[in-house]
Amino acid sequence: MVVVTAVTGPLVGYEVGKRMGDRLFTSRRLNRVSGVLDWALAGLRDRGGVVWGVGYSLLGYLAGSAYGVVERTVGTGLAIAVAVVVVALVAIWALRWHRSVASRPSSDVGEAGPASGSA
């Protein structure tokens, strides 16, 4: 279970940041703390590997603790079933998203192709 959360956590975090990162940083609520936000972004830019490493370690520890609480409350079987369902839903969502991105036409290549200028 720890391996599943260790793999799933960074993937979900990456997707959330990729999809909502810019919107989060430009939201009205964060305008009040723009100085602190700029400082935090500079810190991430300068020392991002350390921050992410510590952050993901803490996230893994918290996920493991939360799993322990759920396991004690509802039992091991149901906890594993819930974890499998969550991982399956995330995998389905990621697969659908990947397929939708792959099916989009690329804007980097012109429609006529590379041989259109020769004649």
Image (cartoon, helix red, strand yellow):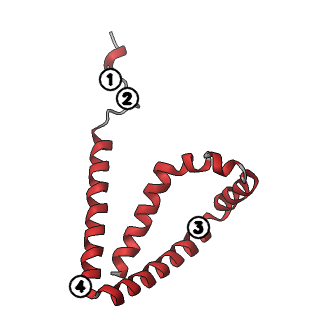
Marks 4, 3: nearer the viewer? 4
Up/down of 101 relative to 90, above or below:
above
Q: Which of marks 3 and 2 is nearer the N terminus?
A: 3
What residue does disc 1 label? 113
Residue displayed at 50% across by 75% down:
59
Q: Residue placed at 35% from the left, 33% from the top?
A: 106
What is the crowding at mark 3: few (fewer than 14 residues within 10 Å), some, or many (at least 20)? few
Q: Which amino acid does label 2 sit on?
A: Val
Which one is earlier in the sequence, the residue at label 2 or at label 4? Answer: 4
**Mark toward the start of the polypeptide (3 vs 1):** 3
In the rendered view, tell whether residue 65 sits above or below residue 103. below
Q: What element carries label 2?
A: loop
Q: In the drawing, does residue 78 fall left or right of residue 72?
A: left
Q: Residue furthest top?
A: 119
Q: Along the polypeptide, which appears first: circle 4 or circle 3? A: 3
Q: What secondary structure is marked by label 3?
A: helix
In percent of the image, x 68 and y 61: which residue is there?
46
The nearer-to-camera label among 3 and 1 is: 3
Q: In which quarter of the image is residue 89?
A: bottom left
Amino acid identity at mark 1: Gly
Q: Are marks 2 and 1 in contact (CB under 8 Å)?
A: yes
Q: Which mark is residue 49?
A: 3
Tell me how far mark 3 sits from mark 1, CA to CA.
Answer: 40 Å
CA neighbours of label 1 inside 10 A, class few (<14), some (14 to 19), many (20+): few
Q: Which image quadrant: the N terminus?
A: bottom left
State the residue position of label 4. Answer: 77
Q: In which quarter of the image is the C terminus?
A: top left
Above or below residue 86? Residue 20 is above
Label 3 amino acid?
A: Gly
Tag 1 secondary structure: loop
